[in-house]
Image: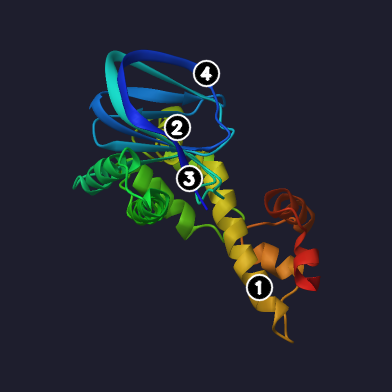
Amino acid sequence: MASLTYIGKQAKTYLISMHKHTDLEIIYCTQGDGALKFADGAVLDYVPGDILIIPPETPHMNFSDTGFKNIHLKITDLIPPYKNRAKIHDADGIVKQLLKQLILVSVSEMKNKNAVVQNYIELLLNLLAGLADAEYYSEYVEKIKNKLIENFGDCYFDVAEYLETLPHSPEYLRKLFIKETGVSPIKFLTKIRLENAKKLLNSAASDSNRLKIKEIAEMCGFSDPLYFSRTYKKYYGIPPGGFLKS
């Protein structure tokens, strides 16, 4: 059962130094603007209506030139549905209304308060997951994402060469992609390739005419089966051959 360990509206602030939490952290910006900077150099800008989701044990700092106010939650005793940091925009204000209701319940004296808070937390996480699926990306990030997905099975596709064909500099586009997605274009492409490889392995596990590891690697853009196996194990914790056996 998940529980709320902190909830409230934070006073106007300009800088919160690098830190991390053991719990899932959700920040809703209500006023001002600023950015979250992470230990790996990634940055997520935010404006009012933006929701920032920070998984447990993720070092980050919050800074602003104008100051900011936010609604800040930490949810404990929960297996987070978010493995990566994320930014979602609450265009219709639905999340803000839900947070207001959650605040009212959390400070109330109702007898079944814990159960109601639990229901609100589950509703909140489901709503955020739905909004994340429909997340908006800027023109060039959307273009890059679509190109990577389109070419995940091409082992000769070169991310750097593709970025050179776009109007902006490759370094600017790489930083913009990281800012909006949380990962670099190359890591995004690797993630897509591995996720599709897992689907093929899952199908092969129940098929008597199963594909070979080498064939699956090639279909998912890996020209070297050994590199594919090492990368797959690093990502999922089990080699592709072990997945088939299990």
Contact flag, marks 3 and 1 (Cβ < 8 Å): no
Task: Tell me what residue is drawn at x 43 percent, y 16 percent.
Answer: 16
Is residue 158 depicted above or below 220 in this figure?
A: above
Give x and y (percent) for residue 56: 56, 37
Give x and y (percent) for residue 108: 30, 41
The residue that label 1 is drawn on is: 202
Identified by mark 4, the residue type is Met
Q: Earlier in the sequence, mark 3 or mark 2?
A: 3
Q: CA distance from mark 4 to mark 1?
A: 41 Å
Identified by mark 3, the residue type is Ser
Task: Tell me what residue is drawn at x 57 percent, y 43 percent.
Answer: 187
* Crowd around label 2: few <14 · some 14–19 · many ≥20 (10 Å): some
The residue that label 2 is drawn on is: 170
The residue that label 4 is drawn on is: 18
* Crowd around label 3: few <14 · some 14–19 · many ≥20 (10 Å): some
Single out the mark in the foreground, 3 or 2: 3
Q: CA distance from mark 2 to mark 1?
A: 36 Å
The residue that label 3 is drawn on is: 3
Q: Is residue 157 visible?
A: no
What secondary structure is marked by label 4?
A: strand
Near-viewer residue (148 or 168): 148
Is residue 67 depicted above or below 115 in this figure?
A: above
Judged from this view, the residue extending furthest toward the left is: 92
Contact flag, marks 2 and 1 (Cβ < 8 Å): no
Q: How many marks?
A: 4
Give x and y (percent) for residue 190: 59, 50
Q: Earlier in the sequence, mark 3 or mark 1?
A: 3
Near-viewer residue (108 or 226): 108
